[in-house]
Image (cartoon, rainbow, N blue to C red):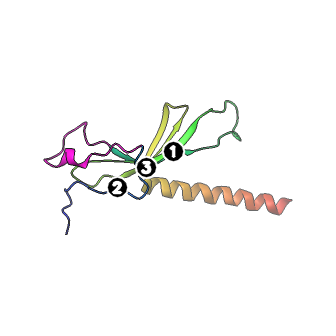
Amino acid sequence: MASETAPDQGHPAWCDRTRCTADPASQANGYRSGVGGQHRSADLPLNLRAGMWPIPPHAVAFLSEAVAPWRCSTYLRITVDSDTELSMPVDNAAALLAALSALVASAMTDAEVTR
C-alpha cells in the first residue's frame, strides 16, 4: 500500500506534458515550498461571445494539481483576459456545473414548450 505522504510520481490522464511543470523528485526529502511545480491540462478555450458587452477577448479553462509529498487536490481554473482567474477544487466545480446545467436545461425545456 502506498504511503499517503509519498509524492505522486505519475501524471494524471488529463496532464498535458507540454504545459506540465511537475517535479515530484523535488519533494522526495520532504515538502519544500515554491518547488515541485504542477500538473496542468491543455487549455479549453471558452466561447463567451454570446455574452453581454463587454465581451472578454480571451477566456480559457484548465485543470491543475500541485506537487507535494501528499496528495493534492485538482483544481478547475478559469482565466478571463489573461489575468482574472476563478479557481476551485474539481469536487466543488462538478457540483456547481451540475447545478448550472440543470438550471440551463430547465430554461431550454421551457423555451421549447413556448415555441
Q: Nearer the viewer, residue 35 or 85?
A: 35
Q: Magenta region: which residues?
A: 19-37
Tell me the residue that label 3 is attached to.
16
Going from N to C along the chain, the mark reached first, 2 or 1, is 2
Going from N to C along the chain, the mark reached first, 2 or 3, is 2
Q: Is residue 86 above or below residue 74?
A: above
- Distance, label 2 to label 1, CA atoms, is 17 Å
Going from N to C along the chain, the mark reached first, 3 or 1, is 3
- Distance, label 2 to label 3, CA atoms, is 9 Å
Characterize the local packing of mark 2: few (<14), some (14-19) or many (20 or more) Cα atoms within 10 angstroms.
some
Amino acid type, mark 1: Asp
Characterize the local packing of mark 3: few (<14), some (14-19) or many (20 or more) Cα atoms within 10 angstroms.
some
Residue 75 drawn at (x, y percent): 41, 49
Tell me the residue that label 2 is attached to.
11
Characterize the local packing of mark 1: few (<14), some (14-19) or many (20 or more) Cα atoms within 10 angstroms.
some
Q: Is residue 77 above or below residue 93?
A: above
Amino acid type, mark 3: Asp
Secondary structure category for the residue under label 1: loop
- In the displayed structure image, the side of residue 55 where residue 93 appears, left or right: left
Question: Hey, which quadrant is residue 46 in on the image?
Answer: top right
Which of the labelled discs sits on residue 43, or is there none? 1
Secondary structure category for the residue under label 2: loop
Q: Nearer the viewer, mark 3 or mark 1?
A: 3
Rendered residue at 63%/32% (across/down): 57
